[in-house]
Amino acid sequence: MPTTMESPRRRRHPGSGRGKARRQPKGRQVDPAALGEIRTLLGDRSRARDLLIEHLHLIQDRWHCISAPHLAALAHEMRLPMAEVYETATFYAHFDVLAEDEAPPPAITVRVCDSLSCELAGAHDLLESLPAVLGEHVRVLRAPCMGRCDTAPVAEVGHRHVDHADEPAIRALVEAGDLHPVIPEYRALDAYERDGGYTLLRACLAGEHTFEDIATKLDAAGLRGLGGAGFPTGRKWRIVRGYEGPRLMAVNADEGEPGTFKDRYYLEHDPHRFLEGVLVAAWAVEAEAVYVYLRDEYPFIRDILLRELAKLGPAGLDTHTELHLRRGAGAYICGEESSMIESIEGKRGLPRHRPPYVAEVGVFGRPTLVQNVETMYWVRDIVEKGPEWFASHGRNGGKGLRSYSVSGRVKSPGVKLAPAGVTLRELVDEFCGGMAPGHTLRGYLPGGASGGILPASMADLPLEFGKLEQHGCFVGSHAVVVLSDRDDMKAVALNLMRFFEDESCGQCTPCRVGTEKAVKLMERDIWDEPLLVELGRTMSDASICGLGQAAANPLNSVMRYFREDVRVQND
């Protein structure tokens, strides 16, 4: 930790006795100039503890880094321990915390996504070549999934994304200094209301619907949490409402799972359909406030939501609750609900031990309804069109509609709205135009980085909750990455394990040490299968949250289904 504190050994004036006063107070001294800058930056904003991360973002955005004097000044201004502010700032990847007297980074940073879909599309070569192309005054960093897997490889110049990135496009943006996010065309409030938007919410607020009416429709439709866990939505609402208030709500818009980008698609095209679902849910569980936690990799969506949220008050649509937009800071672990809640409270995103569950003890210790973006997106349609409409979609035992994020070796990647229970083969052939030219299906990730890898021989299994677990995989948030005969499955599994190593929060030893050790073992020419199996089992059994518990799934899948791609010690 950067520090200007005195040595722990007490200094004395020459000839002085013990207990004499120090030259200056113990601890870091606040620089008056830095304190003035922080006070000007914060203005009349609240100094409440839970806004720490929001205020760190203000510093990062203003100076492109967070200096030691500014960090100390922020701690002083918010009346927080310096250690607490420092540990929070250094936990998140998007904060550049400088050591004492460390030079600030270049004004322009280029991030290149190195997650699986981008690596398949050539991101590694781009990372290798860009430093020489852009020069020493531009910083080039590798970055985890940016939620644009369908346009791989992807880079980010400042806050502006580059789809199908190559050297000329990135160099042009750097030379132009065009660092701001591009706001896509979307349906704003006026257009949404012309299409009947907020009719449902207004009816709920007017007493034309009861809680039981809405919850029963969600039950009949079979709507589930679509962030990965698949918990029945109506049942979750009943559980939260059963706890004594005051209650709160949190929306998980931090889809950091490599291969997942469906929430981004809905937020950037039809934000009010999502917001209406959120406001109906807040009415249903009587939530006094709603916290929408948005990943920092989506700056363009943040601009959209800030613009559209400001319209709800004058329209009389948020009189029953308060809406707060909170900004993530580059931590995959905050997609886990309890870690997200810790981050909403302005702290490091460390998973909580359970019980108690967040439905009972959530944000600020209150009963909290946690929902995913896509789940909220379907509330209006289910109530207005009827639960039978939603439930009528489905194949192979599935019920409802699912938004599959499809990337990799297909002709037409993207968000594919398909029946729940569709198979990989049906998804590729009917919704993606088939495999990419020159590629033959060899395997696929059915549920993003943590969902494991299945071979082409299992392409007729339903992509639905509870259907893949017996094969060591799961569908999760329905992120499908398609692999071909040109892909090395050992390299695929290693890419995924490196992601888990980077994103481990470090709280529990099995995950922190296990992912690092697994990477080292998987980098060897010959795999020690007994040791890798034991390591994976330890992570699965003893990790606090789903990151460590699922990290070995890709590794186990390769040893089970693609042994020809690895040399194993026992073979």
Image (tube, helix red, strand yellow):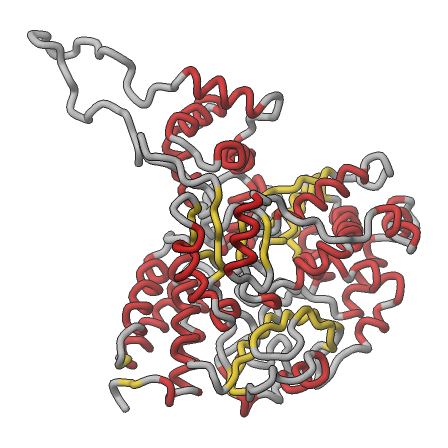
x, y (%) of residue 212? 82, 57
Q: Is residue 160 left or right of residue 36?
A: right
x, y (%) of residue 530? 28, 80
**Can see residue 470?**
no
In the depicted structure, whether residue 345 falls above or below residue 216: above
Q: Quadrant of the N terminus?
A: top left
Q: Is residue 21 left or right of residue 353?
A: left
x, y (%) of residue 301? 67, 49
Q: Quadrant of residue 413?
A: bottom right
Identified at 64% across, 65% down, the residue is 231
Q: Residue furthest left?
A: 15
**Can see residue 240?**
yes
Identified at 89% across, 62% down, the residue is 384
In the depicted structure, whether residue 315 falls above or below residue 442: above
Q: Quadrant of the C terminus?
A: bottom left
Q: Is residue 430 left or right of residue 21?
A: right
x, y (%) of residue 399? 74, 76
Which one is nearer the viewer's eye here, 339 or 503?
503
